[in-house]
Structure formats: C-alpha cells, structure tokens
Amino acid sequence: MTSTVRTRNRSSDADADAGAAPRLPGAWRLGLIRGALEIKQFFRLREQVIFTFAFPIVFLFLFASIFGDDMANTGSTASQYYVASMIAAGIMSTSFQSLGISIAIERDDKVLRRLRGTPMPPAAYFLGKIWLVLVTGILETAALLAFGTTLYDVQLPSGISGWLTLGWLFVLGITGCALLGIAISSVPKSAKSATSVVVLPFLVLQFISGVYILIDTVPGWMLNIGSLFPLKWLCQGLRGVFLPEAAAALEPAGSWEYGRIALVLGAWCIGGLLLCLLTFRWKSRSDG
Amino acid sequence: MTTRHAVRARGLRKRYGDVTAVDGLDLDIRQGEVFGILGPNGAGKSTTVEILQGHRRRDGGELSVLGQDPGHADRAWQARVGIVWQDESAPAELTVAETVRHFARYYPRPRDPEEVIALVGLEAKAASRTKALSGGQRRRLDVALGVIGGPELLLLDEPTTGFDPVARRQFWELIRSLADEGTTIILTTHYLDEAEALADRLAVVADGRIAAQGEPGTLGGRAQARATVHWAEADGTARSEETDTPTRTVTALAQRFDGEIPELRVARPTLEDIYLRLIGERDPR
C-alpha cells in the first residue's frame, strides 16, 4: 500500500517539475562535505587541538628521557623504540579515543538525532569522521616523526617500499581503531561517563601491547591478550619501519611478521565495521 | 487537493514499560493548516510528534504522514518533513551561516540559506558562532534548520518554552509567515494563548488521548457556554450568577441598583477554563 502512495507522490513531484525529479545528494559527496565541517570544528577548539597533539609528544619525551639507553644487540636505542610506539598510540588516540568520546557526546547532545531527522545518508556521517581521523592522524604522525628524527636519530624510510609499508600500516591501523572507537561510543550511558569508559581500555591496551614497556618485558599472558587487539600489531609494524633490522630480535617471533600484521589489522577493520553496523545507536539511552 | 491530509492517524499507541504515553490517538490534519496539540506535561505530546516524524516507533495503530508510514520512511520522505525538537543544540563552533548552509546540502531542493536566515531574523547574527547566541536566537536557528529543506510539513515541539514575551511574539510572527507560505505546521504547546493565536484547529491531549478537538473559538463547547455575571451587593458581598442571558441579568441588576452596578463584570469561559475542565475531568461528555 505504501509503495503505491509513494509512486503517486513521485509522479506528482515529477509533474510539478516538468520531469526533473529531485535528486538526493549522494553519500560520498556529503561525506566529503561533512569531513570538511568536522575538521573545521576540530581546529576551532584550540585547547582540544593542542592537547590532542601534545599528548603523545609529551609521553614520547618522558619515556625517551627516562629509558633512553641503547637496547643490547639491536643497533638501536629505547628512544627510537618509543618513537614507533608513540606513533602507534597517537594513531589510536586520534581515532579510537577521540571518536569514542566525541560521538558519545554528540549522541547525548542530540547532534545525532538531528542528523537522523534530515535526509543525510547515515554513511555520510561515518565518512566525515573517517576524513577527520585521517587528517588528524597524519598530522599527529608527522609531528611525532619530526620530533623523533630531530631528537632521537630515528631514520625515515630510505626507499619507496618502506613508505608503502608505513602507508598501509597507517591506513589499516587507523581504520580499524576508528571503527572500534565508533563501536565503543555506544557503550557509555551518557557523555559524562564517556571519557572514563573509553580511556581505561585504551590505557590498558597500551600497557599490554608494548607501547610503554619494551615488548620483550611484557609478561607473556598479557602479551597474548594484547595480541588480540590491533595496537600491538601496529606498534610491531612501525618498529619494523623505523628500527634497524637487528631490532627484530626483540620481537616475540623474532621477526616483524608483516603478513600476520596485515591479517590482524584487516580482520579488525572488517570486524569493527560489523560491530558498528550491529551496535551503533543514533539515540541516547534516555531517549529510548 | 484541498481534501488531502498531511497526517492521518487511527488508534496511535505507544507504551514505555508500564506507562502508556499515547493511548489510541486519532488525528486528521489537513494540508496547509496550523494544528496545535495542547496538553499538560507528560500528556504524550512529544511522543506523538516523535512518532509522526519517524523518530519513535508506534506500538499500534495506523499512521500516514504525507502519504507514507513514518516507520518505513525513505530519504525522499525525510526531505519533505522538518522537525524542531524541544531540546536541541546546533554545533557550537560553527557560525549561523555555516550551519544553515551546511544543512541545506542534505536536501534535494533546499531553500536559499540567506533567505532562511532572514526569515528567522538572524541576519545580524549570521557570522556569530552558535555558542555566542542567546536561548531565543538558538531556537530561531533550530527553526531555520527545520525549514531549510523546504518541508511540506513542519513539526514543532514546544517551540517557545523559555522565551520572554517579546521573543514569543516574534516567534509567532515567524510561524504565521511559514503558514502563509503553505507549510503544514503541527505544534505542541502548553501555552493556551499560543495555541489560540496560532492554531487553525487544536486537539487537547490528556493521558495520551484526545479530550477535545476543534477550532480554538468553539473548542469544548466554548461558544455555547454560559456567561457569568459578577457584581457586589451594597454591603460589599461578592455575588455571581451563571446565565444564558447575561444582558437580561445586567438590565435587571441596573434597575435594582438604580444606576451603576458595583464591581460589575461579565465573563465568558476562556480557553483556559475550557482547557482546565478538559484535562481535569476525563471525558466531559
């Protein structure tokens, strides 16, 4: 019954417009427009910008200053290890943490409800978030690399293959973490609890994935749990990009395991997407 | 065309746990009319509006809004319905102009953003960020976002709550100008003067049901209601008499007092009297 009514309306619209049926704007284009808007809003909150970018740099400085010694038989220093670690943590903080918290706040502030009341395709909202995360993630990574190459003698990849590896690690890592961030944003009951709900698992993950502690000193059972999540693999891959080959001796497998890294990060991208599709809430809980 | 309905609801029903918010509501709202839904807090007004917009699913009843079931509406339908919720917040860091222009891009045939900003009277604030606006100005921005898509139907949920009297009058003018353009408007309110000033027809809702429906002037038998004549006796005692023929009562009093009647007042029931009776006694008929 609905379909006949719909057809009738459509034809009357078409009559009114002399055959030109109104076209709804597409998801990709609106995703780009939303991305530009998200980035504009992000950079207008100066405090947020400063703290988002400063956080991993401050941590890098602290850890590199405290544990900066040479790592035996690796041809590298702990400072260099922490540059790779903090780039991975920075990627996860700009994606997982910032999306997890900001979407929970937008849900509570009824921003999501308002968008849902417009003909905007839902995909455009998520595409906009992905654009935001890509831009902030690239800036964060660039800032850490600038800091690491100047202060801690980290070598940028010399060949195209090194940059390509960095490229796919970044894209798979940030996508997986962003999807997980979108998924966890549905967990907090309100915006007030969002920060605690998102930050605790992120902090724990950083410890058990070898971000703060050298990977060969993380207890085996912790590392096993950490291996289930993308952060451990992202760290490992980035060490492969920025540390000399000899440093692979530190790794539990004794090698960088790029095949497995790609597999785990890829699986998280797909799993994260499914999780988002199954659990994402446009309404706050109080809103039924 | 004139007989087409913007909204047709039969036996609309919605429960939240043990609470029945909407309990068998029937509505027939014609295209182009301003329809007021009046009722106390918790009467089910907001829930009704949310069901009409498709935000909430109904538990029962039949519903057609602009020819479609909002529970299964597509994007093309959403482009034809605008809503202004009770509690909204536009992005704080964007300016009025940026926000309105951005929302225009979601729609296939949006109105001109500058024209909409002028319509809601925010030209002077177009370059201000939302966080710098007053409460009334934010509400106007909400309305701008509600109408930017050029909706055929606009839903307003308690649009003037928290306004000062001047802002409310200005807001009414805005609603009237939208109605003059042919937009069908459904607004909920608990202000009686607002309903009387704006609505072509009203429904008084109490406990999720319609207690009465009609034009503001005749609602609940208001036009036929008896008048009350108030006066004071020579010793100062206040007296009053309900009557169908107030002129005769006053003439009789004038003869008795031989001139001025002390403290004379003749009153017809206000919309408020009718309303209070309607929501106070369940089913007055």
Image (cartoon, coloured by chain):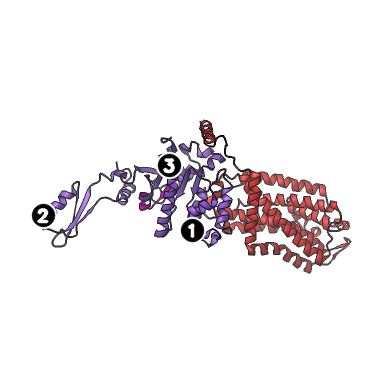
Chain colours: A red, B purple
Q: Are marks 2 and 3 on the same chain?
A: yes
The amino acid beneath tag 1 is: Gln
Assess whether residue B132 is covered by the magenta stretch.
Answer: no
In terms of depth relative to the viewer, which is nearer, A128 or A72? A128
Pointer 3 indicates a residue of which chain? B
Return the residue at label 3: B32
Return the residue at label 1: B137
Q: Are marks 2 and 1 on the same chain?
A: yes
Q: Earlier in the sequence, mark 2 or mark 3?
A: 3
Highlighted magenta segment, given as a residue range: B183-196
In terms of depth relative to the viewer, which is nearer, B224 or B145? B145
Instruction: Judge left or right: residue A158 versus residue A63.
Output: right
Query: What's the mark number on residue A119?
Result: none
Give the image location of residue B7, x and y in percent.
44, 39
Q: Are marks 1 and 3 on the same chain?
A: yes
Return the residue at label 2: B255
Query: Is any part of residue A211 visible from this angle?
Result: no
